[in-house]
Image (cartoon, helix red, strand yellow):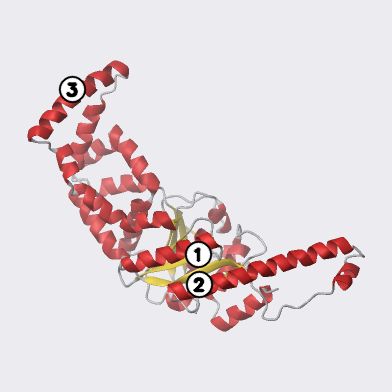
Amino acid sequence: MSVAPRMAGKRICICTGSGGVGKTTTAAAVALGLAARGRRVAVVTIDPARRLASSLGLEQLDNEPRLVEPARFAGQGLELRGELWAMMLDAKRTFDELIELLAPDAGTRDEILANRIYQELSSAVAGSQEFTAVAKLYELDASGRFDTIVLDTPPSRNALDFLEAPQRLTGFLEGRALRVLTAPTGAAAAIAARGGALALSALRRVTGADLLADLSTFFGVLGGVSDGFAERARAVATLLRDPATTFLIVTSPEPAPVAEAVFFHRRLLEAGMPFGGLVVNRVRVLARKPQGIDEAALASDLGGDGDLAARALQALSDLRALARRDAASMRLLRAELDDGHPIVVPQLDRDVSDAAGLLAVQRYLFAPQRKRSALLAEQAF
């Protein structure tokens, strides 16, 4: 089964998996294929590399979606009947935009954004990218601008944080620790006052920085947006479980990414998230009946270089051994993820860094089963 039927009725596609398995490329190729089929699609990546922008024909990507010119792929024989938009998440900017949206008034907004503690904490929190990724996803979905949003995510172990980010934020904002920091009472207030005086005095002597005053201001004004943050976090958690959302797990046949895919699939089910299917990239395909090659004939074709012929045959033997291992990985993935028809993208001859490479991946993702089988057979050895 191709990606197309898996995306029927879906507004959101979240691509997740280990790092280095082609997840960002897969997200872009899914978005490209949907745009070719008439949808208005935005692909959101957190990958700081420039290769996605280059493959889409854009100078750069930033925190707002940019339209990809249809002519970029028309030259490759693909017509975009819909629209393809792309952006790269600026986690810090997204966090700031959320403050601007949720602050009860302009004064509170400006006070939070200018606060040194907020500037440091928002950079640190946003650096993990989990909550800001789903916050941007929610914003784009709520805008109604796009038929489908395709989201790239952090590597899968971090994606557990991605799934739990809304609940963690809600727990922090509604937790006892924040209440004590924003409005300490009784013994807590006395300890804070005494500790504050000592720390403040020491910091002033060493740095001249009024750190505790900044802390007090920060936690005081944070109370003004905590209800809005908690409400947004709950809405995001609901969106991740919406029937119109689907998760594609992207992996390669290497042992470590396979284990990550199995682990994350289990975690998805435990969290009640909708699993849409498996994409396995960079698969070496073994022919059903691998043909033997006569070493003497090969040496003759290579100008009589017997040593080169022997090394070429050894390399072929090694590749076939890797292909057998990949086939074993595929059997394991089918059994563990209960996906009898994972989407296979073979090991391509080159990295995907241009329109032609992205189009090649899209072709494997969206080809009907029979056509994809024929394409894979062409790559077998």
Give the residue at mark 1.
Answer: 258
Query: CA separation, marks 1 and 2?
Result: 9 Å
Q: Amino acid at mark 2?
A: Leu
- In the image, residue 281 sits, relative to residue 158, either above or below, namely below
Give the residue at mark 3.
Answer: 197
Q: Are marks 1 and 2 in contact (CB under 8 Å)?
A: yes
Secondary element type, mark 2: helix
Q: Nearer the viewer, residue 156 or 64?
A: 156
Q: Position of residue 181 (x, y in %)?
A: 18, 37
N-terminal label among 2 and 3:
3
Q: Amino acid at mark 1?
A: Val
- Badge 2, how many Cα within 10 Å: few under 14, some, many 20+? some
Q: Residue furthest left?
A: 186
> Residue 332: which disc?
2
- Badge 1, how many Cα within 10 Å: few under 14, some, many 20+? many
Q: Nearer the viewer, residue 275 or 360?
A: 275
- Image quadrant in which you'd find residue 376: bottom right
N-terminal label among 1 and 2:
1
